[in-house]
Amino acid sequence: MKELEVRQLRYFVAVAEELHFGRAAERLDMAQPPLSRAVRELERQLGVLLLKRTTRQVTLTPAGRVLLQDARTALDAISAAGRRARHAGETTPRLRLALKADIDGGLLPRILDAYAGEEAALPVELVLGPFGEQAQAVRDGRADAGLLLSPFDDRGLDYEPLVTEPFLVAMAAADPLAAQPCLRLADLAGRSLPGGSPADQGVAPGAHGSAGARDHQPSPAGNDAPAASEARSASDLPEIFRLVELGSMVCFFPASVAWRYPRPEIAYRPVSDLEPATLAVAWSQASHSAAVAAFVRAAVTVAAAAQPEAGNTTNGS
Amino acid sequence: MKELEVRQLRYFVAVAEELHFGRAAERLDMAQPPLSRAVRELERQLGVLLLKRTTRQVTLTPAGRVLLQDARTALDAISAAGRRARHAGETTPRLRLALKADIDGGLLPRILDAYAGEEAALPVELVLGPFGEQAQAVRDGRADAGLLLSPFDDRGLDYEPLVTEPFLVAMAAADPLAAQPCLRLADLAGRSLPGGSPADQGVAPGAHGSAGARDHQPSPAGNDAPAASEARSASDLPEIFRLVELGSMVCFFPASVAWRYPRPEIAYRPVSDLEPATLAVAWSQASHSAAVAAFVRAAVTVAAAAQPEAGNTTNGS
DNA sequence: ACTCTTTCATACTCACAGGGTATCAACGGT
DNA sequence: ACCGTTGATACCCTGTGAGTATGAAAGAGT
């Protein structure tokens, strides 16, 4: 019953995600045979069959699915440990805040102001992630805290809700649907959404936890660069707006984002049967840092002042 | 910027806990020089000084403290991944429930009953942990769920409170303090508590999170046995009761535990300024298993029926 | 049905990293 | 001043993880 190894987990996750030893090996930048051996050895150690292989295809067993989940969180925890330790050693400690540009509900300036006034305040460094990867950034230690929209994968995170606001659908002003003052999801059936990567923006308030957003890591492993440009279908706001104006797609935004981009050619309409978006401040359960605590306090205070009727659901910590 | 290794974290944690390379090496069952080298190499990789060494003593730097925290959670996550995968591969899947004998508030039979009626119910295996190590057992995958008393280290766990009941202090019936119907903490100053291992029973509602209960793992590493007998000062209930009867110490218990051990020679008294104990059902954030969900549902339902006035603070998941 | 291709497994070799032993060097207590 | 304690350095050696070459099995195509 020997010790489990990081290498083994990385290998297994790669294979489990690719469901193909050859591709997985390529992704890991190694040859296929040692990869096969390593996974077999892992199975032997655990006494469990993780993958069902035929010469034509590889599938996960139930135990494999369990391990895939846990291995990902474990690998996150490891990266987080390394990143945080590195960060803690830097000469100028900073608070790294992960957010998606413009989803702060207009609160960010006030939050930063309030935070600057706190005792334990540090200089804030914004970590702009292109996807819905804010939660992941906090989880794996690239950021100390994050502002994120509510259906997010909260494993390993503590969080405090800040403000809740409705989702609006953005569509071409000329769209016949724009005549109605309020829509329902069914009305939008058949309209194309920013598909491919539904992770961007507040699209698809369905996909929670589990797989969903984090199956592939498109950037080459171990790349700490500020998030390589996402060459997806349509991912930056100007491009999305352009497509919306042209009527070739519709898109959901939290109200505060919509207010920030008033465009004559785009109509924003509420959607009656769509869960509202909740902006939350999240941080890793693992780190009890005074700077983070101060930031959370600042954020909650500002949000409470901005939306005084909000409920106060305290969780964890 | 190479990959962090499990071995390195284990080594660092050992040294950080012992603050002594020699002892740490012994604990890791290896020689001292390679340990020193490994830790140095870790520091080099992170570009951070983790330990300040003089020839006479070793101390943690701030970065070292940060890493100690994160390394522990990371190591837990790794063990959990291994244990859960092993468990998922077993032919008879079971729900492993961690609890301390008698702290279930008398709810356990009813909860098990209700659970047995659930769709996704599995045979339940009780994991009796001697310490306050239930949370740890759930965290590192030895158990799928746990019943634990409230101030517990909830990192990595989701939980749902079940019932709240006051702590009582148990003392010799002959004790002069027993004359009073209700005590305050100050009255007990100077009385000896079950010291040494304050982790047992609901003693000391202070020590939360961080270090505290989990610094050493007394049982030999990798031992999956049903928790080796704890040879601490006084850890099993009969022994504790004996000492209480003799007046040589006092001890706190949640009310339901006290009711279960009525003894003529022992007086139970409420303590006015002591936080009540909350029993909670907890499970790992990482595992979204139907069996666990069913158990939580059963537990919450039973608890709600037993204590209908309880508030309903929902958190996570 | 035969073949070709795809894909995972096996056999063998090699290199390096992690561990051991012996020893040194620095600092403290007496 | 000396000795004991404790971490660091030097050197060697073994085990294991990775590569290359090759095999075997199972679909797909004709």
Image: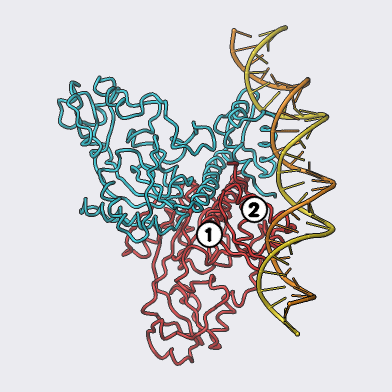
Chain colours: A red, B cyan, C orange, D yellow
Quarter of the image that includes the C terminus of chain B: bottom left
Residue at 66 percent of width and 44 percent of height: B46
Give the side of residue A316 with respect to residue A18, left or right: left
The x, y position of residue A147, in whole percent, is 48, 61
Q: Nearer the viewer, residue B179 or A130?
A: B179
Using the numbered discs, state the Cα–Cα distance from disc 2 to disc 1 in whole angstroms: 16 Å
Give the side of residue B244 with respect to residue A166, left or right: left
Is residue A13 positioned above or below B149 on the image? below
Q: Chain of mark 1?
A: A
The x, y position of residue B8, in whole percent, is 63, 40
Q: Which residue is mark 1?
A: A65
Give the side of residue B227 with respect to residue B162, left or right: right
| Res A120 visible | no
For mark 1, does the 10 Å Cα neighbourhood hold few (<14), some (14 to 19), or many (20 or more) residues? some
| Sequence-earlier tag: 2 or 1 | 2
The x, y position of residue B50, in whole percent, is 62, 37
Is residue D17 positioned above or below B38 on the image? below
State which quadrant residue B169 falls in. Answer: top left
Q: Which mark is residue A40?
A: 2
The amino acid marked with disc number 2 is Arg
